[in-house]
Amino acid sequence: MNKPISRRTFLKKSLSTLATLTGLGIGGSYYAHNLEPKWLETKHKIISHPLIPKGFHGMKMVQFSDTHLGFQFQLKDLQAIVNKINQLDPDVILFTGDLMDQPNKYKAHQKIPPVLNQLKAPLGKFSIYGNHDHGGYGSEIYNDIMEKSHFTMLKNTSTKITLLTAEEIFIAGVDDAMLGKPDFEEALSGIPEEVFTIMLSHAPDLADTSRTYDIQYQISGHSHGGQVQIPFAGALVTPPYAEKYREGTYEIDSLTLHVNRGLGTTRLPYRFLSRPELTVYEFQAEK
């Protein structure tokens, strides 16, 4: 795993990104501030594996991530995303961290659950911690919001989804790598061998740990896809634990990783060549 950069270095790089955007001119800055952050991309991914039971064929999961409420993304934007997710008719909903940009400074905590409670998923809604959820003494604030929103928090633990046929898969989640204490052994304890297992980790670079366990798929966020990308140069800023795996899908030995670009922004209110993303996963049984 790459050595994490310091907060000071991360902020310094963020400022250099702002300078780059300024260099793009007024038109480029307008696009990056006002247009691309609202230009949602819905990605569709097929999850196919011999361990997926036949009864799960066609099951649909929707992932949303990194809303960073209170910075640029606001409650009205969250409502629009909730409406979009419900239109996709998911069986399972996953939130992979960073709900609010600064939990202890966000003044509308009580307005979030009524919005998230509108999400419908018959097989469950699951969430994990991101670094911003822990930041500013926000851990309990975030946990309380997700509990009131009827999400199951997977903090170094797992849950199983069981069908009426008794077929099952497991979804595990680890704590955030930057400000939490991820514990794979604890998260995976009690999961039998030869059962399809998904790991939720806010930090995508923890895939190098997931690959050493009996995990078939990891779902992550955190990177924002770099948030600002420069043609032929790539992402100018990537946070710690998202430096190796920045966006998209990777095959890492027997593990598949997908890194969602998230919905909001942080540090700088811009996106450039890194559109906000919802990810739809559809299961295909191979048996």
Image (cartoon, helix red, strand yellow):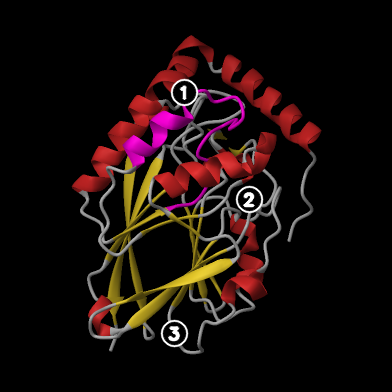
In this orientation, which residue lies closer to the viewer: 169 or 233? 169
Was residue 204 drawn as part of the magenta stretch in this picture?
Answer: no
Q: Is residue 140 above or below residue 54?
A: above
Does 168 sit left or right of 139 as displayed?
left
Circle 2 SS class: loop
Q: Is residue 214 above or below residue 157?
A: below
User: Which percent across, then down, holds residue 23?
Assistant: 60, 16
Looking at the rendered image, the disc whose residue lies closer to the viewer, 2 or 3, is 3
Question: Residue visible at 60% across and 43% down?
Answer: 140
In primary-sequence order, the first of circles 2 and 1 is 1
Q: Is residue 198 above or below residue 77?
A: below
**Circle 1 residue:** 32
Q: Is residue 65 visible?
A: no
In primary-sequence order, the first of circles 3 and 1 is 1
**Circle 2 residue:** 242
Was residue 109 drawn as part of the magenta stretch in this picture?
Answer: yes
Q: Is residue 221 visible?
A: yes
Question: Residue visible at 53% across and 76% down?
Answer: 215
Question: Residue visible at 25% across and 51% down?
Answer: 120
- Amino acid found under the numbered disc labelled 1: Ala
Query: Marks 2/1: CA distance?
Result: 22 Å
**Residue 22, image quadrant:** top right
Label 3: how many Cα within 10 Å (few below 14, some 14–19, many 20+):
some
Circle 3 SS class: loop
Q: Which segment is the magenta one?
A: 95-116
**Residue 30, image quadrant:** top left
In this orientation, which residue lies closer to the viewer: 218 or 121? 121
Looking at the rendered image, the disc whose residue lies closer to the viewer, 2 or 1, is 2
Q: Are marks 2 and 3 in contact (CB under 8 Å)?
A: no
- Amino acid found under the numbered disc labelled 3: Val
Question: Residue visible at 69% across and 52% down?
Answer: 180
